[in-house]
Amino acid sequence: MTDGVPDRAFPPELEGRTRPPDGSTPPTPEFFAGVVEGSLDAVIAVDQDGRIRYANPATEAMFGYSLAELVGQRVEILLPAHFRRIHAQHVSRFAEESDSSRRMTARPEIQGRRKDGSTFPAAASITKASGPDGPLMTATVRDLTGDHALQDAQRSAQDRLLRSIERSGDCVSIHDEQSCYIYLNAAGESLLGRGVDEVQGQHATSFVELHRDQIAGDLGADETRTFHTHVVRPDGTRIPVEIRAVSLGDGTVLATTRDVSSWVEAERAVRQSEERLVRAQTIAHVGTLERDLRTEESSWSEETYRILGLEILPGPRRREEFMDLVHPDDRQAVLKSRVDALAARRPRYTDAFRIVRSDGSTRYIDRVAEIDFDETGEPFRVINTIQDITERALAEQAIRASEARLARA
């Protein structure tokens, strides 16, 4: 003892436990003591009366007592009051048993009590060695506060995730290796028109138009697969859906199923609108040419090709392809109309000109050009609407010629 503080000597009763069975040189007591002194777990040696004989620095840090306050005290000082009586019985019973150790994993979780009265979750293991004064028991105590905090955080995250899934507007389901339902959220019940009890354990193909191995199949770990199909409700209604399936890595699959009825209807409406536009342009002999002023690439409608007498081809067109068809006598005026409108920042201009088709025929064209400007005032796109007015132009020419003949008569 130094200045009233007990020496932190390693109990000699435990030295024999360090002797190798093959008779080779054992680790020195100093080595073993260094291991215990440096342990992050509390190590406490207790005699057969349950009194503390030794405590390492981690014990002081964990429980808030100094070594001088611990040595000679009953070990129950480190436990909440309601645990002390039964713990003393356990210690006494263990001292008399033939077992020499009990591991942490074989013991239920306990509670430790700090000097300030606060408690914390802990795990403990205990070993026993014989000595001249009777058995000496050594307890190793681990503070589980951090483990509990991590577990609480994980449970909280899982709870938040589950609530988020339950509130999702999309159907979320989990499937086993055979593609059978394990879980279905509320939106899934609504989409399938069936309660979770009707769905659990059933194969996905019972309610969705799929091949039997399409959801799970050979889906690799962390792989995502997307496909479009239909959900079949109890009344036979087929609902178009998009399914995204991702492997969770343990043989199960998480599937998100979205009702895409509105998308399908919108696409159908767009196609019908485009078809009506094409028919209207054909009837009116009206075509459109949309040109990107930054790339000088243009996209032409089908009727534009017909007006120009060209074969319909995929891909963008160049401005020069159009200008090469403009009648040589009108080309300068067409270029000037464009240059003047851009210079004046006019969003719209009109002109009329002729084109010469590849077969040599001449067509008369009316054009309305609309220019789009960006936020800096720079033009970036021109949408041209052209109309073939050849019949009208020729009729007007015939009328003027007839009037001129009558005037001369």
Image: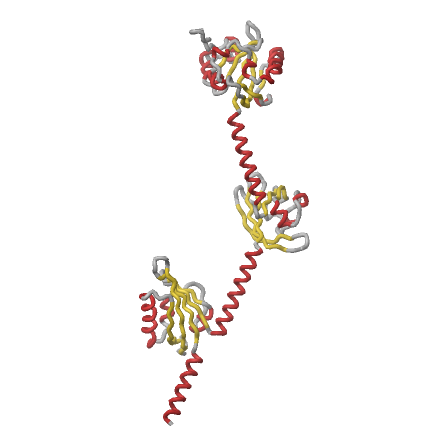
Residue 29 is at least partly visible in this image:
yes
Q: Residue at x 62, y 52 (%)?
A: 231
Place of residue 137 in the rendered image (x, y in percent of width and height, measured from the top left): 56, 12
The single residue placed furthest to the top in the displayed view is 132
The front one of 180 and 7 is 7
Residue 317 is at least partly visible in this image:
no
Place of residue 49 in the rendered image (x, y in percent of width and height, measured from the top left): 58, 8
Above or below, 309 against 397 in this view is: above
298 with respect to 21 (left or right): left
171 with respect to 305 (left or right): right
323 with respect to 179 (left or right): left
Q: So how many labels did they put on this image?
A: 0
Above or below, 118 against 372 in this view is: above
Place of residue 252 in the rendered image (x, y in percent of width and height, measured from the top left): 59, 41
The single residue placed furthest to the bottom in the displayed view is 409
The front one of 77 and 21 is 77
Quarter occupied by residue 160: top right
Quadrant into which the C terminus falls? bottom left
Place of residue 79 in the rendered image (x, y in percent of width and height, measured from the top left): 56, 17
Quarter occupied by residue 183: top right
Quadrant into which the N terminus falls? top left
Q: Which residue is drawn at 46% across and 16% down?
A: 57
The front one of 137 and 86 is 86
Quarter occupied by residue 174: top right
Q: Which colour scheme is used?
A: secondary structure
